[in-house]
Amino acid sequence: MHWSDSLLAILKDNDIRLTAYVPDNVLTPLIAGVYADNYFLPVAATREDEAIGTAAGAYMAGMRGAVMMQTSGFALIANALASLVLPYQIATVMVISERGTMGEFNIGQSLVARTMRPVLETLGIAHHTLTDEANMPFIADSAIKQAYATQAPVALILSPLLTGGNPAAKAKLKLPKPS
Amino acid sequence: MNNERNAVKTLNRTALTDRLVRGLKRDEAVIGGIGNTNFDLFAAGHRPQNFYMLGSMGLACPIALGVALAQPERGVIALEGDGSILMGLGCLATIANLKPRNLTMIIWDNGIYQITGKQRAATAGASDIVAIARGAGIANSAWVRDEQHFDELIDRRFDDGGPALLAVKIDDQPGKGQTPRDPALIRSRFMKGLGTGRSAGLEI
């Protein structure tokens, strides 16, 4: 099964219906998947902090949500995490496609990527880097269940090792396929 | 468009929030934006369906959107300041495209960042919140002309007729109350008010 189909199945198993996102190349199959399945309620947000707010509102009103973004989008949400999600104890599942590493062509992406894990660590937010299809279902499923059980956010980081990375980067840098 | 904005009377947020809350009859959810907006919501009398933001400036409408999508049969009202909505105008486009019929946004526009020292906001100059909302695709957007017009506009069921946006020119007075700064308690009580909370036998 393609990694995106597995991940969507895990979201569904955990009753996550609302999927708020800002588009990204790597997320394309996930976004297409939520539009192809009436179970999901996609929200095309204009900014990542807006998506966090909408998912927070839905959670409090009884609908679980996931927020999908790329690395640079995560850099926009520190305030929403520190002043909404964390103090109000709102379970929030973040799916972050990892740019800025393993063949990045955009210097801005490579620099902003350095802020992601330090911010997650500083805020004490659980985060897991998903690198292969074999371990992904266990990690994603258990991390999501823990987030809801403990009313906490969690970040699932989609490594290029899992997704193959950004197709545009592969074309530009003539990257080999990950083994 | 600017004529519509200039023709309105300057009103008072505390008084109008009180009028709004006293008129709610169907357990509508009300999301109070950061600062004076939620202070006045609290001052109008706590209700279990109130959510008070103590941070995350600009997210009152996105949070209200999430509530509206999750509970489509419940009316949902976002109260937000002009400085706050200016921080996240993109949500108006998101809301316009999703068209939640049970979402109403009320923007209190004093043209200043009152709580940080009355610095001038873009809304004191060229920027017209109603024109912005209409341009984003929220056709049901209006400037509130006076108290009577406000009463007419809120005398309806909030679970239908949206998305709607009302912009109100207000004076420079601060909020009246002070919301308790306990976010976990606010969230817990709000969820209980929406029927989604875990009681786990801990209720008194």
Image: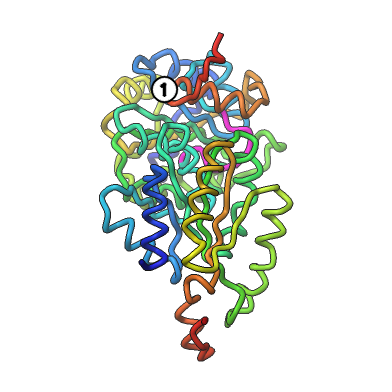
Query: Which residue has dot 1 on it?
Result: B195
- Identify the residue at horizontal 44%, vertical 48% (top origin): B91
Q: Would residue B101 appear left or right of B114 to someone viewing this image?
A: left
Which residue reaches farthest top?
Answer: B204
Which residue reaches farthest bottom?
Answer: A174
Q: Position of residue B147 (x, y in %)?
A: 42, 20
- Identify the residue at horizontal 46%, vertical 43% (top origin): A54
Q: Is residue B59 magenta?
A: yes
Residue nearest the viewer, comparing A47 with A146: A146
Q: Is B44 located above or below residue B132 in the figure?
A: above
The quarter in which the N terminus of chain A is drawn is: bottom left
Can residue B131 be seen at all in this image of the molecule? no
Q: Position of residue B182 (x, y in %)?
A: 66, 25
Q: Main secondary structure of the magenta part?
A: loop
Q: Is B77 located above or below residue A163 in the figure?
A: above
Q: Is residue B166 magenta?
A: no
Magenta segment boundaries in residue numbering = B52-61
Q: Residues within 10 Å of mark 1 (few under 14, many from 20)?
A: some
Q: Position of residue B199 (x, y in %)?
A: 51, 19
Three-letter code, disc 1: Gly
- Identify the residue at horizontal 36%, vertical 20% (top origin): B151
